[in-house]
Image (spheres, rainbow, N blue to C red):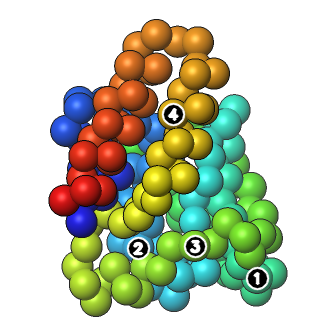
């Protein structure tokens, strides 16, 4: 099974958003318990945004704010000044404990034919030519690997 990150690496998509790189290392940054209940979702205007699946985990991350800001800034050459934590059960889909058990490096995505068709339609909306070409390459690789 191919992973989205391995496909992005294959086509030299070096502009993978930094938040994906942080997500990939999230388990080692915050530990198993916190990682199973939280996921980094964005970095905007020097604010690191994290989703959690329950208010208890929001409180836990609030206590880790200073540590997380220092760690993220140091490890990823950022200048985040704050962390915003949102409670959102819908966003927590990563199972980091399974990652530890199977020692998988990346999240695995399974694409059905309908997903691929939706991706192709979405690409038509992209105006940036370089980004559009990259996404077309990604979709082609996904489609080729789906049949293997």
**First in residue order: circle 3 vs circle 4:** 3
- Label 2 – label 4 distance at C-alpha: 32 Å
Mark 4 surroundings within 10 Å by alpha-carbon count, few (fewer than 14), some (14 through 19), many (20 or more): some
Q: Nearer the viewer, residue 61 or 96?
A: 96
In percent of the image, x 38 and y 38: which residue is there? 139
Disc 1 to disc 3, C-alpha distance: 13 Å
Q: CA distance from mark 1 to mark 2?
A: 18 Å
- Residue situated in front as seen by the camera: 54 or 93: 93
User: Mark 1 = which residue?
Assistant: 54
Residue 15 in which image quadrant: top left
Circle 4 residue: 120
Query: Judging from the image, what secondary structure is the residue with disc 1 in?
Result: loop
Relative image position of residue 146 (x, y in whole percent): 30, 56
Q: Nearer the viewer, mark 3 or mark 2?
A: 3
From the viewer's perspective, is 138 left or right of 112? left
Separation of disc 3 and disc 2 at Cα?
Answer: 14 Å
Q: Secondary structure at mark 2?
A: helix
Marks 3 and 2, the one that precedes in the sequence = 2
Give the structural element (helix, strand or loop) at label 4.
helix
Q: What distance separates the C-alpha of mark 3 from that of mark 4?
A: 24 Å
64 horizontally vs 32: left or right: right
Element on which disc 3 rests = loop
**Residue located beneath label 2 in the image:** 27
Confirm or deny contact between disc 3 and disc 4 (CB under 8 A).
Answer: no
Q: CA distance from mark 1 to mark 4?
A: 35 Å
- Disc 3 target residue: 93
């Amino acid at each position: 099974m191919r992973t989205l990150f391995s496909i992005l690496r294959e086509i030299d998509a070096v502009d993978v958003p930094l938040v994906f790189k942080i997500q990939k290392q999230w388990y080692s940054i915050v530990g198993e318990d916190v990682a199973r209940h939280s996921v980094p979702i964005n970095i905007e205007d020097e604010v690191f945004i994290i989703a959690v699946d329950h208010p208890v985990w929001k409180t836990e991350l609030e206590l880790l704010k200073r540590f997380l800001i220092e760690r993220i800034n140091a490890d990823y050459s950022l200048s985040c000044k704050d962390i915003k934590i949102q409670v959102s059960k819908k966003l927590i889909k990563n199972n980091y404990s399974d990652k530890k058990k199977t020692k998988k490096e990346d999240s695995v995505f399974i694409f059905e034919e309908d997903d691929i068709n939706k991706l192709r339609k979405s690409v038509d909306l992209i105006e940036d030519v370089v980004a559009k070409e990259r996404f077309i390459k990604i979709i082609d690789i996904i489609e080729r690997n789906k049949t293997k």
